Image (cartoon, rainbow, N blue to C red):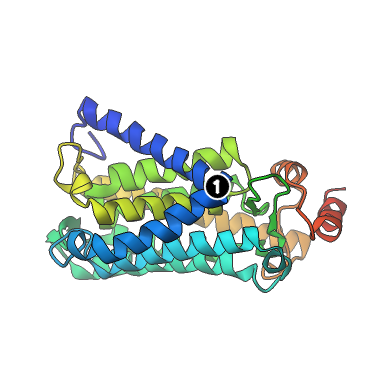
Amino acid sequence: MFLFESIPWYSWLTWFVVLGALIGLNEVTRRWKAGGIAFFIILPIILTIFVWPTTAGADSSTGTWFHWVKVYSALAGALGFMAIRYFPKLAANKKVLIFPAAILAINIAEACIRDFQVGAMNTDGIVDGVYMLSGSWNWMNGVAGLLNLVAICGWAGIFISRDKSKDMIWPDMLWFWIIAYDLWNFAYVYNCVGDHSFYAGGALLISCTIPAFFIKKGAWLQHRANTLALWMMFTMAVPTFVSDSMFAVETSRSPVALFVISALALVANVALIIYQIRTILRKRLNPLKDELYTDHPQYKAVVAANIPAAPLDSQVAADKFDKMA
């Protein structure tokens, strides 16, 4: 196969199990505060003390600085978003709304640094427990990630939905940014932890994209933080699942595949930046303060379906619906 070695039926079945589990657990942590507390506070404390020091040691494929930073930054995002969702005074503070954009930017930057690091290694072999092949693809995808980071916009428009789940809604984060992110992030995983990418690149990314497009629109970042935190906790606890188990799937280790995936990510994010710059210039907007895509049908549909909860009802809803008029 182009991207991977042959994939047996039981690995495909496991892939769908992983996808379903991530979507299901995301719904549990999204819909019920107790679920979020259990999975993002109590469980990580137990794992940090009793499990990860053994399973994610120096000899493990998840024992690198990046995996440790990633699991705690993902948990920080999930917990920070819970705080914004459940404490109305935080959601009402515009300065606090910088946090979701900041944690997203930090996570992208971490991955970009790793891509550049792998590119500079000039390696062709096992590094940190996984196979890596350095090349131009690392540099291309690192640039693609930085472009995706720069394209983060509209965080001032984040609000909390009025339904029971109290979701963190980011209307300006539309499908074209999400697709560009998915292409970049898959390429990153494929480049830097390739033999994990069947699950960590495919199933994990789709597990937050499906809810963002079909279950709870406008809450992609919340879906992403939750599913990423869940996956990172699992792989830190059971690192052999993606590396040495019967369900593991290796990449084809093809330079052509590496180049094509990263080239697609770069093209998509260059197109995203061009579109964003055109939008900014055409509308004369400030991307650090303004929402850019308020005239898009998807933006309008997300806002209409998620009228902000108190105490934001009057002001934010009025502001947003004025823009939609």
Task: Return the residue nearer the eye: 159 or 163.
Answer: 163
Image coords of residue 12 (percent x, y) = 28, 30
Task: Return the residue nearer the eye: 5 or 129.
Answer: 129
- For the point 35% across and 68% down, which residue is it? 69
Quarter of the picture containing the N terminus is top left
Image coords of residue 33 (percent x, y) = 56, 52
Can residue 217 be seen in this snapshot? yes
Mark 1 surroundings: few (<14), some (14-19) or many (≥20) residues within 10 A: many
| 183 lies left or right of 313 | left
Can residue 254 be seen in this snapshot? no
Quadrant in the rendering for residue 49: bottom left
| 145 lies left or right of 68 | right
The number of callouts visible is 1
**Identity of the amino acid at label 1?**
Arg
Quadrant in the rendering for residue 143: bottom left
Q: Is residue 89 above or below residue 165?
A: below
Q: Is residue 316 above or below residue 198?
A: below
Image coords of residue 258 (percent x, y) = 27, 50
- For the point 35% across and 47% down, which residue is it? 201
- For the point 14% across and 46% down, which residue is it? 244
Residue situated furthest bottom in the rendering: 95
Q: Secondary structure at mark 1?
A: helix
| 217 lies left or right of 211 | right
| 24 lies left or right of 199 | right
Image coords of residue 224 (percent x, y) = 48, 51
Residue situated furthest top in the rendering: 9
> Which residue in the structure is indicated by mark 1?
30
